[in-house]
Image (cartoon, coloured by chain):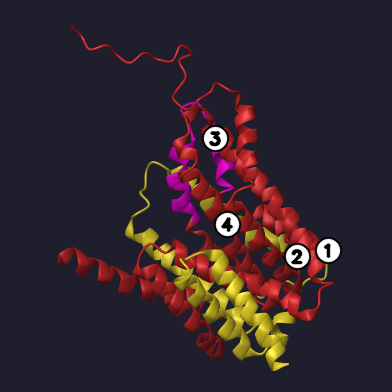
Chain colours: A yellow, B red
Amino acid sequence: MSLTFTSIDAWWWPWLFVLLAGWVPNDIWRALGVMSSGRLTEDMEIFRWVKAVATALVAGVIAQLVVLPSGSLAQVPLTVRVIALALGFAAYLNGGRRMAVGVLAGETTLIAGYFAVA
Amino acid sequence: MTTPTPPLPASGLAPGDDGAPLRLWWLRGMRRFASVPAVVLMGAFIGFGALARESGVTLAQAMVMSGLIWALPSKVVLLGVIAGGGTITTAAVAVTLSAVRLMPMVMALIPVIRNARTPRWVLYFAAHFVAVTAWVFGMTEVAALPRRVRMAYFLGFATTIQLGAMAVTALSFAMSGALPLILAAALVFLTPLYFTVSLWGAARDVADRLALVIGILLLPALHQLTPQFDLLLTGLIGGTLAWLIGRRARTKGAAR
């Protein structure tokens, strides 16, 4: 099917899209987890693969947001976005692995870099 | 002489149980909304609300996504496909791939929070709230409580952070449109920053860390080749590669 989010011009289509492509493929795994709890163990090899694939997928989203953003972030130069992510991550690694340190460093770099270049 | 057995509390209650009714334990769970992980999660949903606005969904759709899907990675993957003009099939496959990890998480959590008399529908209801924050809460704080009160305490917390996240999604969505460009961009930028540090923090072994690095590097390259399936292929190829290298590292370590 080549139906996108904006393919059908009806009020119900985006909702159906969210239900079929968002809610169902998500909650079905939670339900399967309840059904198989006590029967399968979580350190099976298949679940290690699952976690790696899920991690790589979210990593792809990170890259998509930083390298190919749309909207307001696209107005910030590419180099500034990449450096901000790299510095934020470096600050997290060197700042006692605290999430707040990484997020603050990255945000500060993004804003300062935007004004420095503009 | 026989060794005296330690006296049971007069009430017959388990240690740590003050005998309070379950609705009070539910409220106690709700109160944990004021905790570091919950506050960090709300910050991440500020990013989600801003990102949703720029991805072409409405405020109501963004809120419903927060309630129905709940797990941030799945929602951000869905927004990514929507913003990129991908099809419903691509979106469903991408969301599935990012959500399979919920299954082993639920499998591990359910035996911890249930007791012998918990009805099945309550288990399915509780499972809906499984995502990283509630899961860690369940596996640590809830696991330390007497079994009788665990489900109430877990659900009190989980339902509260979900409703809070829906409210934050709406607020951020509404406000980010009125912000100066750089501040709106900074809110959207919360998402990649939050995911980078939280994925690194949640990584258990080499494979997970490699998957993060490979995935970030792979997407721009695959986007040049196939902008339609770049995200899906990044997950499948990057994740499988990272898993293979990680497995090799593990078996080598075990052989030594």
Residue that carries the numbered disc 4 in the rendered image? A26
Going by the image, does A23 lie left or right of B251?
right
Going by the image, does B181 lie left or right of A69?
right
Residue found farthest to the bottom: A117
Residue that carries the numbered disc 3 in the rendered image? B151
Amino acid type, residue under disc 1 in the picture:
Trp
Mark 3: which secondary structure? helix
Task: Confirm or deny contact between disc 1 and disc 2 (CB under 8 A).
Answer: yes
Residue that carries the numbered disc 2 in the rendered image? A14
Cα separation, mark 1 vs mark 3, equals: 38 Å
Mark 3 — on which chain does it sit? Answer: B
Pick the quarter of the image with the N terminus of chain B. top left
* Residue at the (69%, 93%) spot, across then down: A117
Categorize mark 3 by other alpha carbons within 10 Å: few (<14), some (14-19), many (20+).
many
Cα separation, mark 1 vs mark 2, equals: 7 Å
Q: Range of the magenta residues?
A: B102-129
Residue that carries the numbered disc 1 in the rendered image? A11
**Between marks 1 and 3 in the image, the one whose residue lies nearer the viewer:** 3
Cα separation, mark 2 vs mark 3, equals: 35 Å
Residue B162 visible in the displayed image: yes
Amino acid type, residue under disc 2 in the picture:
Pro
